[in-house]
Image: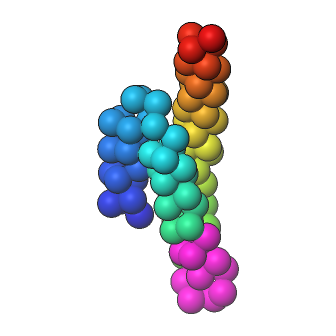
Amino acid sequence: MDLTAIAAGGLAWYGVRDGLWWAWIIAVVVPVMGLAVALPMHYMGHFNYDWVSHLGAIYLGTIIYVVGAVVALVGLTQGASAAAQARR
């Protein structure tokens, strides 16, 4: 998951900041897919860790990530509408 965070951060820093929709889509889809694959395994009895100490940081990071993705989406949407108005 650490490398996924680095890749999503790079996409956000260089692609999303430039207004590239494909970079936002990839930066959102890839970590969500990774979480969707990894998280259910923790509830199938394969791990005997306390969920707060083991998964608490992942849940906190997911909340922060979702807030950041929404903020970036709002910025992309406003940028797209401003560019459309400038073309008129």
Q: Nearer the viewer, residue 5 or 86?
A: 86
Residue 46 lies within the magenta run: yes
In the image, taking residue 6 as reference, residue 24 lies left or right, namely right
Q: Is residue 16 visible?
A: yes
Q: Nearer the viewer, residue 25 or 67?
A: 25
Where on the picture, by quarter, is residue 4? bottom left
> What color scheme is it?
rainbow
Q: In the rendered image of this protein, does residue 87 appear above or below residue 43? A: above
In the rendered image, the quadrant that contains the C terminus is top right
Image spot of residue 31 (x, y percent):
50, 59
Mark count: 0
Where on the picture, by quarter, is residue 17? top left
Q: Nearer the viewer, residue 21 or 65?
A: 21
Q: In the rendered image of this protein, does residue 26 appear above or below residue 43? A: above
Q: In the rendered image of this protein, does residue 63 appear above or below residue 56? A: above
Residue at the image position 46 percent from the left and 30 percent from the top? 19
Where on the picture, by quarter, is residue 2? bottom left
Image spot of residue 70 (x, y percent):
63, 35
Q: In the rendered image of this protein, does residue 24 appear above or below residue 34? A: above
In the rendered image, the quadrant that contains the N terminus is bottom left
Magenta-colored span: 36-47
Image spot of residue 83 (x, y percent):
55, 18
Residue at the image position 56 percent from the left and 89 percent from the top? 46
Residue at the image position 33 percent from the left and 60 percent from the top? 3
In the image, taking residue 31 as reference, residue 85 lies left or right, namely right
Residue at the image position 54 percent from the left and 83 percent from the top? 47
Q: Is residue 82 visible?
A: no
